[in-house]
Image (cartoon, helix red, strand yellow):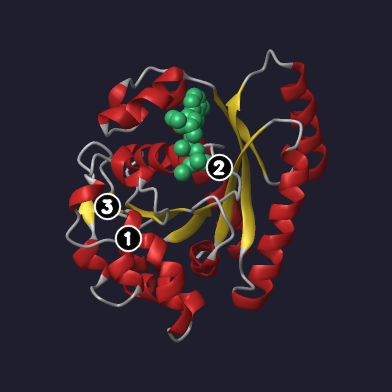
Amino acid sequence: MARVFAIANQKGGVGKTTTCVNLAASLVATRRRVLLIDLDPQGNATTGSGVDKLNLEHSIYDVLTGECSLVEAMQFSEHGGYQLLPANRDLTAAEVSLLNMPAKEKRLREALAPVRENYDYILIDCPPSLSMLTVNALAASDGVIIPMQCEYYALEGLTDLVNSIQRIAGALNPELRIEGLLRTMYDPRSSLTNEVSDQLKAHFSDQLYETVIPRNVRLAEAPSHGMPALEYDKQSKGAQAYLALAGELSRRQRRSARAVTA
Ligand code: ADP
Ligand code: MG
């Protein structure tokens, strides 16, 4: 049964999409079955997976509105090795279209139910907002992965995000938890980075991933070739960091599975 993770942060440009694409490819490299869902109308995860967002027969929008099944909208990412539910600007209409639908917050959860057993991991790339789309992602997920930059205002934004997640989860999905905090675009030479990083360790030690994602130009270049860094430049620091993250994620999973059965 797949573990479903929303990759969320209401702030834009913190590395949500980069994390989705590269973590998905890294999990595939460790022989996991992965479905990546692009839930951002910008469609960056779609483009970054090598799928043309301007020529989609079906997208996640059609799935949410019930116009087609999830399997009908799915496409295979050649370079990533995972299945993709693509998105494009059509998805901006979802906010309005979903308003009058029954169980509007649970459309994604219901759509995923029949395919959950076909995957080990389902990753959801959220838009930079706490909109109805993000609410659908949180209602469908077991955990939230929060990518963040170690900047001055990061902690303040984090508190807001955690509170919002708790509020939304309380009403719709009591099982939801913060799966992990991921430090992205990490620069160990910056004293501010180290300061914020220390504060994160103090407040969120259990949830903070040991793996950090360095600032790496290969991660920024790879999407324009429609591929994850692992395919574009496997030896790059960025590709290797996401491989390490996939390893840490799996180890955590095994540990919590043992805790449940022990
Ligand atoms: P979000 O999805 O949160 O808006 P993105 O993943 O699109 O953020 O990242 C924002 C920009 O920063 C993109 O241009 C991306 O290529 C770049 N980027 C993301 N992570 C890194 C990194 N670790 N090193 C260098 N550039 C990065
Ligand atoms: Mg994005």
Q: Disc 1 designates what residue?
A: 90
Instruction: Point out residue 9 in the picture as x, y percentages from the top left corner.
Output: 59, 48
The amino acid marked with disc number 1 is: Asp
Q: Disc 2 designates what residue?
A: 12
Q: CA distance from mark 3 to mark 2?
A: 24 Å
Q: Quadrant of the N terminus?
A: bottom left
**Where 38 sits versus 133, above or below?**
above
Instruction: Point out residue 237 in the picture as x, y percentages from the top left corner.
Output: 46, 19
The amino acid marked with disc number 3 is: Gln
Q: CA distance from mark 2 to mark 1?
A: 20 Å
Q: Residue furthest top?
A: 189
In the image, is 78 to the left or to the right of 258? Answer: left
Mark 2 CB lies closer than 8 A to ligand 1:
yes
Secondary structure under badge 2?
loop
Callout 3 touching callout 1 (CB < 8 Å): no
Residue at horizontal 69 percent and vertical 61 percent from the top: 164
